[in-house]
Image (cartoon, rainbow, N blue to C red):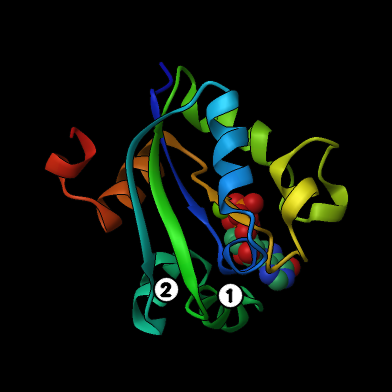
Amino acid sequence: MSGKRTFTMIKPDAVQNGHIGAILHDITQAGFKIAAMKYTRLTTERAGEFYAVHKERPFYQELVSYMSSGTIVAAVLEKENAVTSFRDLIGATDPQKADEGTIRKKYATSISANAIHGSDSDENAAIESSFFFSQLEMFA
Ligand code: IDP
Ligand code: MG
């Protein structure tokens, strides 16, 4: 059975380019409820830890330094089939390949600075949510 929650970050490029409001609007229009939300910044150490699964990928250093380069918005979102439904809403990793109307197509700058993160499984959604929020904050 698929879960009701996913985790997202509005990435530094989208924050810098003034897209927080528009992206949150798209997310809530698509039927997601915000269970928890935080405007924050990752240190390089914390960004490295968050993306540790990509350690061996050639873009790891670039990703870590980019994700710690500015403020982000971290949030836990709720909807039926949250993970899959949210991945559909954000579109492909490479914004040039993302479908029309998706968040990455509309707001991303490049494959690295691609505006938004979305968890890829229920298990990672839970792990990533607890990276930023306590259980109490998630059920507030
Ligand atoms: P996803 O965010 O669509 O799940 P992943 O493959 O999990 O994509 O990669 C994590 C993040 O790493 C991407 O969102 C993007 O910011 C960055 N990234 C992925 N592939 C590349 C690449 O080929 N060059 C530079 N950055 C990349
Ligand atoms: Mg991923």
- Left or right: where 45 falls relative to 9: left
State the quadrant of the N terminus.
Answer: top left
- Left or right: where 137 falls relative to 71: left
Question: Amino acid under label 2?
Answer: Ala
Q: Residue at x 34, y 75 (%)?
A: 46
Task: Decide if ligand 1 comes within 8 Å of the CB at mark 1.
Answer: yes
Residue 35, above or below 29:
below
Q: CA distance from mark 2 to mark 1?
A: 8 Å
Q: Which numbered disc covers residue 63?
A: 1
Residue 126 or 113: which is nearer the viewer?
Answer: 113
What SS does tag 2 mark?
helix
The residue pinned by badge 2 equals 47
Circles 2 and 1: CB atoms closer than 8 Å: yes
Query: Percent position (x, y) of residue 127?
Result: 31, 49
Q: Residue at x 67, y 65 (%)?
A: 17
Residue placed furthest toward the left: 136
Q: Which numbered disc covers residue 95?
A: none
Q: Mark 2 packing: few (<14 Cα in 10 Å), some, or many (20+)? A: some
Query: Percent position (x, y) of residue 91?
Result: 72, 41
Quarter of the rendered structure image containing ligand 1: bottom right
Q: Residue at x 52, y 73 (%)?
A: 67
State the quadrant of the C terminus.
Answer: top left
Residue 109 or 55: which is nearer the viewer?
Answer: 109
Question: Amino acid under label 1?
Answer: Leu
**Picture quadrant of residue 136:** top left
Q: Earlier in the sequence, mark 2 or mark 1?
A: 2
